[in-house]
Image: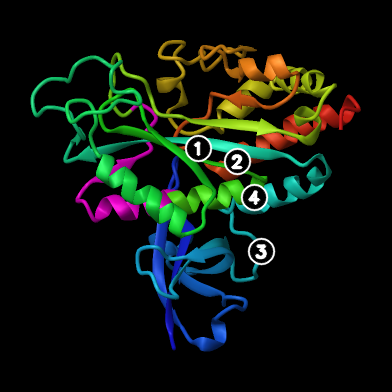
Amino acid sequence: MSFKAEYIWIDGTAPTAKLRSKTKILGDDAKGGELPLWGFDGSSTNQAEGHSSDCVLKPVFSCPDPIRGGENVLVLCEVLDIDLAPHASNARAALAETAERFAAQEPVFGIEQEYTFFSGGRPLGFPENGFPAPQGGYYCGVGADEIFGRDIVEAHLDNCLKAGLGICGINAEVMPGQWEFQVGPLAPLEVADQLWVARWLLYRTAEDFGVSATLDPKPVKGDWNGAGAHTNFSTRAMREGPEGYAAILTACESLGEGSKPLDHVKNYGAGIDDRLTGLHETAPWDQYSYGVSDRGASVRIPWQVEKDGKGYIEDRRPNANVDPYVVTRLLVDTCCAALEKAGQV
């Protein structure tokens, strides 16, 4: 019996890529085996010119389709040129190379994806005229006067769980209509692949409610928090005592060396300077800092980590619209290289 495979890919829109997808009908011969390559018109996705528009979709991750159900699947794909080399927009290929180079250090990530629901031109829960009460009571709140969109959030969570994604939590954020879900802990490629699929499921789930979801890092100007993708990171050396804390400090120091802070920040999502202002639980975009339990630092060391002498760090700089393939590659490349140089592997 045939089944539906929803092929999902990341397009070439700049400065922030968009998700695209289309459906392929496959037969019994494709069940449980390698899913076939497919193609698309790259001239319609900012990935090719019209005179040479063919691009190739290579499946890299699949999971049950929780929306269609049955034997139908979601299929995340890399984009290739017709010679089967990675397309210029394909950030996954570079991560795969970096992750393999430092695989022995067993890097692991957990990414906190913040997002905002919009209905029409306003965040969900904002009045038609003016603004709601200031932020404060909305964070992890309860009640119809403070929480907006919970039905969509619960449906998205259920869809992620049915798909078998490594989603590990949800919570309301500091602005009406603003929420967060977390994916991980997972290895670099797995966390990035699954975050992209979870994003697709977020958009697709909200679509059924007539609501849109945005990863805009500063969806409302003024005295409101932005939306980030705080990225938690550790290696085996950081997670294990008694030298784990020394490895954590090495990783934190490496992120502040030379041009590294700006090299990272400029790749942490478009509009980073609108969000990283030094206010609203952020450090200034052009200054690097780290500290224990400090949500105003670029990188936070959780208090429990200092107490235990091992654990992980939280890079608080990435925007909600960051490419997870890029942020994981940068953190692995910078921190793992420093740990290797220090002999802390």
Q: Which residue is mark 2?
A: 326
C-alpha gap between disc 4 and disc 1 = 15 Å
Q: Secondary structure at mark 1?
A: loop
Which residue is at a point 39% across and 33% down the rendered structure image?
171
Residue placed farthest to the right in the image?
343
Q: Amino acid at mark 4?
A: Leu
**Distance from the alpha carbon under mark 1 to that under mark 3:** 24 Å
* Callout 2 secondary element: helix
Work out which quarter of the rendered image holds the N terminus and state it. Answer: bottom left
Determine the secondary structure under disc 3: loop
Is 26 colored magenta in this rendering? no
Residue 334 position by quadrant: top right
* Residue labelled with disc 1: 322
Task: Tell me the residue that label 3 is attached to.
Answer: 85
- Circles 2, 1 touching at the beta carbon (< 8 Å): yes
**Magenta-colored span:** 199-218
> Can residue 181 be seen?
no
Which numbered disc flags the more N-terminal residue, 2 or 4? 4
Q: Is residue 29 above or below residue 128?
A: below
- The amino acid beneath tag 3 is Ala
Task: Give the residue type that dot 1 points to.
Answer: Val
Between circles 1 and 3, the one closer to the viewer is 1
Give how far across and how far down residue 336 sits, in percent: 78, 33
Asked whether the viewer can see residue 221, the reply is: yes
The disc, 1 or 3, on the residue closer to the chain's N-terminal end is: 3
Whole-percent x and y of residue 142?
27, 28
- Choose the circle earlier in sequence order: 2 or 3: 3
- The amino acid at mark 2 is Val
